[in-house]
Amino acid sequence: MYLDLDRTPAGRSELDVAGTVALGLGEGFAPEATISGELTLQNLESRVLASGTLQASGMAECARCLSAFAMRWDVPVELMVLRDPHSNETEGDTLLILQRDGEVDLAESLRESAALAYPQMTICRDECRGLCASCGADLNDGPCGCVEEPVDPRWEGLP
């Protein structure tokens, strides 16, 4: 996942992106993601702007039933490659890369974008019933047979 500054035409162009990055988010999260899509490049005099929305996919663990499942999520990308390494320029939340010429490795910037876009709650499907709070059985496979205790009426309004 490289951007060749010397071969990027002036003005607007497209860059196809495809590859795998290690997310490094910890246990229970997708260890790596496959990223694909297309970024729009604006090659200006002193900088190259890259923006677009990529698609990421990877294996995740359901927060309700703890089963592994394949997950997809959108990764918004906005980054700027500055050609002047001594520039003090900032652009809000845009990721900055300093590179005068040659190839720029986008893997770390794309890894960061994919990690930031990773959903906080990973659920295998909307109708996932999760695990029994008493015995830990997967309720998606059917009822577990535990006797339901009466619910304290103060908690009835909670989901």
Image (cartoon, rainbow, N blue to C red):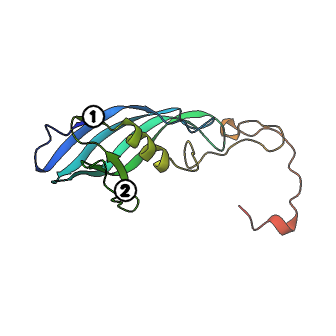
* Residue in front for this viewpoint, 7 or 56: 7
Neighbours of disc 2 within 10 Å: few (<14), some (14-19), many (20+): some
* Residue in front for this viewpoint, 82 or 66: 82
Displayed quadrant of residue 29: top right
Which quarter shows the N terminus?
top left
Displayed quadrant of residue 57: top left
| SS at badge 2 | loop
Q: Position of residue 144 (x, y in %)?
A: 78, 38
Q: Do callouts 1 and 2 mark residues in contact (Cβ within 8 Å)?
A: no
Amino acid carrying label 1: it is Tyr
Q: Residue at x 47, y 34 (%)?
A: 58
> Looking at the image, is 117 positioned above or below residue 4?
below
Amino acid carrying label 2: it is Thr
Q: Which mark is residue 112?
A: none
Which residue carries the number 2 mark? Answer: 94
Neighbours of disc 1 within 10 Å: few (<14), some (14-19), many (20+): some
* Residue in front for this viewpoint, 90 or 76: 90
Which residue carries the number 1 mark? Answer: 2
Q: Position of residue 131 (x, y in %)?
A: 72, 41
Q: Residue at x 57, y 50 (%)?
A: 120
